[in-house]
Amino acid sequence: MGTEHPDGSLPAPPDDVLEAARVGTWTWDPRARTLTVDALAARFLGLPQEPARLTEAELRARVQPEDMVVLRSSALLLIAEGRPMDVPVHVVTAPDRPPRPLWARLAPGPADATGAIRGTLVEESEPVAERLQIEALNRAPLPAGQTAGQTAAQTAGLSGGQAAGVPQAEARLRRSREAFLLDAGRALAEATTTSDVLRVAASLAMPGFSPDELAVFGVEGNRLTVVGHHGRLTHAQEPFQMPLDTAHPAAEAARTGRPVYISSPQDYRRRYPAVWPLVSGEGRRAWAVLPLTGAGRTTGAWLAAFSEPVAFSSDERAVLGTVARMLSQALERAHSNESERALSRGLARSMRTGAPQAGLSVATRYVPTGGGLQVGGDWYDVITLPDGRLGVVIGDVQGHDVHAAGLMAQLRTAVHAYAAEGHRPDAVLARASRFLAGIDEDRFATCLYIEADPETGMLEIARAGHPHPVVRLPDGTCLLRHVDGGLPLGLMPDGDDYPVTRMQLQTDEILMLCTDGLVETGGHDWYTGWIRVRDAMSPAPADDLEGMADALITAVHGPASHRMPGNLADRREDDIALLLLRRDALPGQPGAEPDGPERRIALTVGQDQPERLADARQEIRGVLHDWAQPEQVDAGTLLVSELLANVLVHTDRDAALLVEVWGARPQRRLRVEVADSSDDLPHRRSPGEMSSSGRGLMLLDILADQWGVLPRGDGKCIWFELHEAPTPAAASAADLVG
């Protein structure tokens, strides 16, 4: 058995063994796009028997185009699956000789060669080659108009002339050109930039009459400019340009929209004597210049120069014309893509946030969906308002195309202007909805707008169909905060209402706003996507807001995103807009106390907002999500709901809720305060069996560990506490330790 390399592959046989076995070797470098062959493989390819290096264009010129298509697809499959493959190859050694049949084996390169492909090249054995030749002879077409058993003379007698037989070599050449056009069309369709298109054009090797030099001209006003070139066309290199009325074949093709074919140097000198001195020293024998047209107008010209004479038959002109049309379409697509990318870069630059605001820190991220555009319909904005407050906006316009990006830019500007005028959050969204409906009735947008007070941390939030915000507490707990909202912008511009929700952001708490791409990218639904976001946000350090933003994006787009794939088969992608808002302690204000509460939430329930009782119940359950005893969670939820309802029913004032969790597990303490501005103190009553009220204080006595009433200068506060009771298992462990 042979010795294996550390990477598991067998060592290469000695060169003399390979030569004795008539096996040539080669290596393909995908970065340099070159093929390195040994002496025997070079001889198989019709080259002198010595090691050589071929470019992709030189390889195309020696291999039948249909085999080149198979080689390319086999190489892609090899890279994807990593298994060796055998491919038949026919090498064209001379125009008057049949192709040489070979077998090429493709295998992955060594571990230290990035992306390299290596292989062997052997001649087909005589029995196999003989069978292939017999099969080709049996498939040879009969002369036109002749049937089996009929002589050529009989056919000529029937037709009244000489039979128009199609030589086998000409038929093979036509098939090769058809395969070449398919391969060229695929390569040009994959090119996304102008440089990619020019690179593909330079590698084109047309069967039978491959050009040696190429140049692409573009029309700019009344001038013709060289866009790119390949070869040694000294007169057609950047920044060469000329007026369209110049007596030059490229100018004539661009000016008239008709191709120009020049089959000899004498013909060139006769037709274009003024520019002949520029090209006479290049050693070319034939030229073809074809117009590049798009959208009904001529956009440039493509020049191909040949070192051998070319008669430019009808077939050759058809091939050149087809390539010119494909090249024109590819350049048009590339120009459109580059223009869209330039637009998207400008729009993305406009989303940069302004100067930081004292008391509030902001971190933002924008990640496009990964297509040609670098911006879509998602956006964010941070606005400094006249009264010292801060406006924060995030939104998502329907779609991922240029139109969506344009609408996003207009809508972002409109929201910014309405906010800067001093309108309240509900008025800002109402005006923005009418604005969007006025410029486009077929698109809608989701949006969330916040006015933040840096001194108090009070937030006023209006939501138009956008995902709810997330609050990260100082201990790392992440909670979805329900915010009342209306329909997306643009759906009902004259009849929709956007209620305003007030909540307070405590010191060192972080509010996260995002578009749905952060949750759903990778095929996730809202449940699995939220778990992914929570698990990335919770352990991130609160004092490094930029690092937290990076961690969230990495969880969605980084390598770790594939460890927990979504459960949706399409793994859909979307733009991502992310904004993190953290409340910091102002100078002179106390920061978060080291021995302060681990968790704190505050919200207000207005007299006209009884539906917010459900939000309050959801908030306290979120704060107590890891509480040891579920019964205490139910008790705390019931008491919060009861105290808030009492304020709404028995007073005409709003209720302010403050929830704090103190201490460490498993002996924490929950303190809840419900305050209002009414001076009426609660009184204990003895309700009857059928009474529907009067049991609030009784419930406090039964369920709370402590409770009380605190009169205040502007009203009163009813409070209660629950002390976390450890689980039976934890209590038993504590007893054993004690």
Image (cartoon, grey):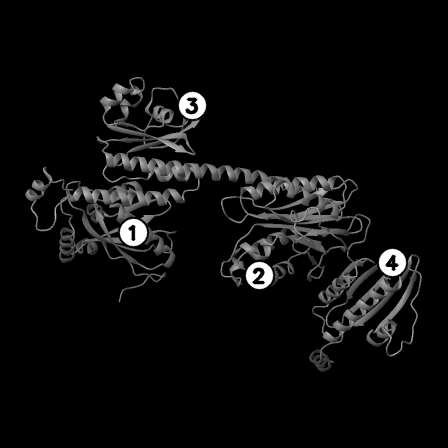
Front in this rendered view, residue 315 or 386: 315
The answer, for residue 49, to whether it is visible in the render is no
Q: Which residue is mark 3?
A: 223
How many numbered marks are there?
A: 4
Residue 245 at x, y percent in the picture:
38, 19
Q: Which residue occupies the extreme top position in the image?
A: 274
Q: Is residue 76 left or right of residue 264?
A: right
Q: Which residue is mark 2?
A: 525
Q: Earlier in the sequence, mark 1 or mark 2?
A: 1
Few, some or many C-alpha atoms within 10 Å of disc 4 (few <14, some 14-19, many ≥20)? Answer: some
Task: Give the distance between the C-alpha atoms of the residues marked 3 and 1, in whole angstroms.
Answer: 42 Å
Q: Earlier in the sequence, mark 1 or mark 4?
A: 1
Q: Earlier in the sequence, mark 4 or mark 2?
A: 2
Element type at mark 4: loop
Is 461 placed above or below 336 here? below
Residue 70: numbered disc = 1
Residue 407 at x, y percent in the picture:
60, 42
Residue 205 at x, y percent in the picture:
28, 39
Are the two marked residues, 1 and 2, in contact with CB atoms closer than 8 angstroms?
no
Q: Amino acid at mark 4?
A: Arg
Q: Which residue is mark 4?
A: 653
Q: Please identify, in this view, whether the residue under mark 1 or under mark 2 is nearer the observer.
A: 2
Residue 492 at x, y percent in the picture:
67, 49
Q: Is residue 485 left or right of residue 286?
A: right
Q: Amino acid at mark 3?
A: Arg
